[in-house]
Amino acid sequence: MGISFDSRPNYPDRRAEFTRGVPRLLLDMTDVTPEQTRVLVVTAHPDDVDYGVAGSIARWTAEGIEVAYCIVTDGDAGGSDPSITRAEMAAQRREEQLKAASVVGVRQVEFLGYPDGRLTVSLELRRDISRVIRQFRPTRVITQNPIRDLRSMYGSHPDHTATGEATFCAVYPDARNEFAHPELVAAEGLAPHTVSEIWMLAPGGGDVTVDITDTFDRKMAALWAHVSQTAHLTDLEDRMRAWATAQAAAGNLPAGRLGESFVVLDTR
């Protein structure tokens, strides 16, 4: 599935809101209108976006914010069923991601098709993410942590860190520099674009915590759409609720609330 794109007007200067090291609760979006906010989520595998940010996405799309996904690998190394081919697994995971996206109000999904488990921070990957940024022209890009977390093996999958690093490189300097990947302008007519913010997934706590209490059920529905990956996880909802409770507490949300956390970088 491709993405249909159009431009949006300029948006207010929000840099003062994101003082480094000072936690900030994002409880509403009144400072930026939905028409002025476009969110592009770049993650390594089908289902990564739903584990990390689906509750926030459901909230934002309900508020009228346009969101698109860029999924870097085809997910062919996922699952544990030896009776299907890896090509069949990749096709199944694409379908699962499209269903999960629709659950949280996302209609625009781009699959880059890189092989699962073999991702590196190549110039080709930087170019391909830059292409999507120039097409969709987001104000905010959400991606994974480019730095290995020595406290979390599962949180530091090499495809995740490669995706995070390549996305950071695509936001700056590639997507905004007309002389980076010149074929994007010469052959495809894609003008440079400057992203305003990167929001990095930060499940251990960050600068911004989005309250997802009212959209947690939709987050779970999106995760259950990944049948090949989650059907056997009988404790998944309990685990996700505990995770979201911990993030809400780290972000100083009231007791009983659920959250998703991010580290925010001003990239203008």
Image (cartoon, rainbow, N blue to C red):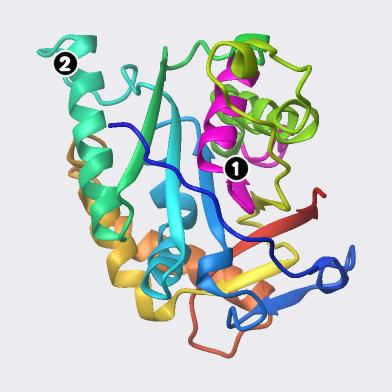
Compared with 123, 9 (above or below) is: below
Please tell me which residue lies in front, 75 or 142: 142
Q: What's the residue at 57%, 31% (across, down)?
A: 160
CB within 8 Å, label 2 to label 1: no
Is 183 inside the magenta-drawn segment?
A: no
Q: Which residue corresponds to mark 1?
A: 143
Please tell me which residue lies in front, 83 or 262: 262
Q: What's the residue at 38%, 66% (across, down)?
A: 58
The image's mark for residue 88 is 2
Element type where label 2 sits in the image = helix
The answer to which quarter of the image holds residue 54 is bottom left
Please tell me which residue lies in front, 57 or 15: 15
Is 137 inside the magenta-drawn segment?
A: yes
**Res 46 visible:** no
- Residue stretch rendered in magenta on the structure: 125-152
Instruction: Report whether 86 appears left or right of 177.
Output: left
Please tell me which residue lies in front, 164 or 15: 15
Residue 238, position as x, y percentages in the image: 34, 65
The amino acid on which the numbered mark 1 sits, given as a three-letter code, is: Thr
Q: Which quadrant, please, contains the N terminus?
A: top left
Question: CA separation, marks 2 and 1?
Answer: 27 Å
The amino acid on which the numbered mark 2 sits, given as a three-letter code, is: Glu
- Tell me if mark 1 has few (under 14), some (14-19) or many (20+) residues whose alpha carbon lies within 10 angstroms of its own: many
The answer to which quarter of the image holds residue 209 is bottom right
Instruction: Report whether 204 appears left or right of 242.
Output: right
Residue 172, position as x, y percentages in the image: 78, 33
Q: Residue furthest left?
A: 83
Sequence-first tag of 2 and 1? 2
Q: What's the residue at 61%, 40% (across, down)?
A: 144
Compared with 41, 162 (above or below) is: above
**Res 93 visible:** yes
Element type where label 1 sits in the image = strand
